[in-house]
Image: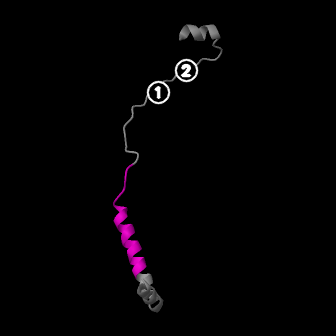
């Protein structure tokens, strides 16, 4: 372990380049591992619209429904 520290202290740019290569290659490999937590599902949608006319009383509203 101390030998790795000595090499890192003697050649800091080499260690930095190797570290950058390891990080970039890891990111490149993980890019293809996309996990779809929420898959695309076609859920049926129902829309109910009711057009109200102005001045509708409570009794007329109850009679209509």
Residue located at (48% from left, 24% from top): 48
Residue 15's disc is none
Q: Position of residue 46 (x, y in %)?
A: 44, 27
Q: Secondary structure at mark 1?
A: loop
The furthest residue to the bottom: 10
Mark 2 or mark 1: which is in front?
Answer: 1
Q: Is residue 54 above or below residue 6?
A: above
How is the structure coloured here?
Answer: one colour
Residue 27 falls in image quadrant: bottom left
What's the distance in space between the residues labelled 2 and 1, CA to CA?
Answer: 13 Å
Residue found 40% across the figure and 48% down from its top: 37
The residue depicted at 34 percent of the width and 66 percent of the height is 29
What percent of the width, then of the height, locates residue 3? 41, 87
- Name the residue rendered at 53%, 21% in the picture: 50
Q: Main secondary structure of the magenta part?
A: helix
- Span highlighted in magenta in the image: 18-36
* Residue 26 highlighted magenta (yes or no): yes
Check disc 2 and report the residue beneath it.
51
Give the secondary structure at mark 2.
loop
Q: Is residue 16 left or right of residue 42?
A: right
Would you call the spot at circle 2 few (<14 residues within 10 Å), some (14-19), or many (20 or more)? few
Q: Which residue is mark 1?
A: 47
Is residue 32 positioned above or below 41 on the image? Answer: below
**Quadrant in which the N terminus is drawn:** bottom left
Q: Magenta segment: does it hold 14?
A: no
């Amino acid at each position: 372990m101390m030998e790795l520290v000595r090499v890192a202290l003697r050649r800091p740019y080499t260690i930095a380049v190797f570290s950058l290569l390891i990080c970039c290659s890891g990111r490149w490999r993980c890019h293809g591992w996309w996990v779809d937590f929420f898959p695309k599902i076609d859920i049926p949608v129902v829309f109910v619209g009711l057009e109200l006319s102005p001045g509708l009383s409570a009794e007329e509203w109850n009679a209509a429904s």
